[in-house]
């Protein structure tokens, strides 16, 4: 067996190894001193914070807050944003929902001065004896001026259309904004409350039978998937088909609501009745709502578009091309 020859202490390899070892030790000692120094700074800062948190007499601080320099933060400030709660929330701070922000700020109204507008609500002088069926007895092509007070179809209640520029771009989120806020700019409820009588079967002229529109909805078994101002929808087989698949009742599923843009085409003489009825019922469930019409009205909103062919009912589809 051969043995490896011992390397001389003065060998260049040994000298280089010792030099590298010495450099490593010096480096560790150097950073070790820095770590101790940084640790002392951290301990001092924590002591400063703790002393300030216990002194409720300091201006801008209390027993539930930390103070670092001139900045005061609640204790346990490392909590993350969760379910819409504040990022900075004290351990013994009550969880409160954020106040409802007013969407009708000066900045918003500067962009759209008609934000939050709805026609004034008129009430019948007959009071509780007033029946909405009388509103259906007028000529269907009537402009609503001959309707009894309380039907909310009189064009005079709408006032004149505000003028718009030729390149005006409608704000399609007007109705949705009011729906989510629950009030118009004057603080009136939106959508306005409607009587249960309107849920009954009402014929073309107010009869108690012959409501083909309601019959169509009932036969199609269309069901609501949630409130109009909801940001989620609840889906299940019974929403649209009425019967569970394979006879097995499945639990409903709640998913984020899809973005929905609602477009209708109409005529100017329907702004005060049909479009107004849409605005005050289902249109708020749409993220965007716009009526293509023969006249523009930024309050609804409705826009007049030039199109091919005559301005006739059978040619209105040209407005949504």
Image (cartoon, rainbow, N blue to C red):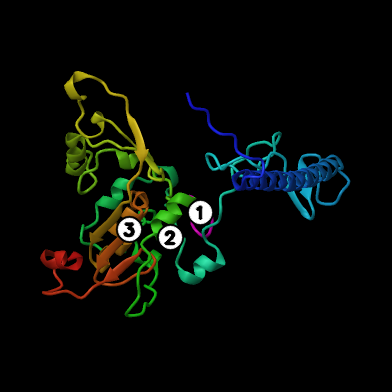
Locate residue 139, reporting x and y percent.
21, 58
Residue at numbered disc 3:
289
Q: Nearer the viewer, residue 24 or 167?
A: 24
**Does 77 sit above or below residue 161?**
above
Q: CA distance from mark 2 to mark 1?
A: 9 Å
Q: Residue at x 21, y 28 (%)?
A: 242
Tell me which corner region of the image, top left, top right, bottom left or bottom right, holds residue 175: bottom left
Foreground mark, 1 or 3, reads: 3
Compared across the picture, whether 94 is left or right of 50 comes to: left
Q: CA distance from mark 2 to mark 3?
A: 14 Å
Magenta span includes 186: yes
Lower sequence index among marks 2 and 1: 2
Compared across the picture, whether 31 is left or right of 79 comes to: right
Mark 1 and mark 2 in contact (Cβ < 8 Å)?
yes
Locate residue 203, reporting x and y percent.
21, 44
Compared across the picture, whether 81 is left or right of 305 comes to: right
Q: Secondary structure at mark 2?
A: loop
How many numbered marks appear?
3
Residue at numbered disc 1:
188
Instruction: Name the image quarter holding the C terminus.
Output: bottom left
Q: Residue at x 31, y 72 (%)?
A: 296
Query: Quick check: can you spot residue 123?
Result: no
Give residue 118's mark.
Answer: 2
Q: CA distance from mark 1 to mark 3?
A: 21 Å
Q: Main secondary structure of the magenta part?
A: loop
Lower sequence index among marks 1 and 3: 1
Q: Mark 2 packing: few (<14 Cα in 10 Å), some, or many (20+)? A: many
**Does 118 sit above or below residue 11?**
below
**Does 225 sit above or below residue 111?**
above
Q: Residue at x 66, y 43 (%)?
A: 21
Mark 3 and mark 1 in contact (Cβ < 8 Å)?
no
């Amino acid at each position: 067996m051969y043995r490896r020859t011992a390397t001389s202490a003065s060998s260049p390899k040994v000298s280089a190894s010792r030099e590298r070892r010495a450099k490593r030790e010096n480096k560790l000692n150097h950073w070790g001193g820095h770590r101790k120094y940084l640790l002392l700074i951290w301990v001092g800062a924590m002591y400063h914070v703790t002393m300030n948190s216990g002194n409720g007499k300091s201006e801008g601080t209390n027993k539930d807050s930390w103070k670092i320099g001139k900045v005061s933060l609640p204790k346990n400030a490392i909590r993350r944003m969760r379910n819409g709660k504040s990022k900075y929330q004290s351990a013994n701070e009550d969880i409160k929902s954020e106040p409802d922000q007013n969407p009708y700020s000066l900045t918003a109204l500067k962009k759209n001065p008609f934000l939050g507008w709805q026609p004034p609500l008129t009430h019948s002088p007959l009071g509780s004896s007033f029946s909405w069926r009388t509103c259906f007895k007028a000529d269907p092509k009537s402009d609503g001026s001959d309707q009894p007070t309380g039907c909310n179809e009189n064009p005079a209640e709408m006032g004149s259309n505000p003028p718009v520029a030729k390149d005006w771009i409608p704000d399609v989120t007007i109705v949705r904004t009011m729906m989510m806020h629950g009030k118009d700019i004057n603080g009136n409820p939106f959508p306005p409350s409607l009587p249960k009588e309107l849920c009954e079967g009402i014929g073309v002229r107010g009869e108690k039978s012959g409501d083909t529109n309601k019959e169509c909805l009932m036969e199609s078994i269309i069901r609501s998937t949630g409130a109009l101002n909801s940001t989620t929808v609840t889906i299940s087989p019974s929403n649209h088909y009425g019967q569970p698949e394979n006879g097995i009742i499945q639990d409903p599923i709640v998913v984020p609501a899809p973005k929905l843009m609602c477009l209708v085409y109409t005529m100017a003489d329907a702004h005060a009745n049909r479009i107004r009825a849409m605005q005050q019922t289902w249109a708020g469930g749409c993220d965007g709502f716009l009526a293509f019409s023969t006249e523009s009205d930024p309050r609804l909103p409705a826009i007049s578009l030039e199109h091919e062919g005559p301005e006739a009912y059978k040619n209105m589809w040209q407005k949504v091309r």
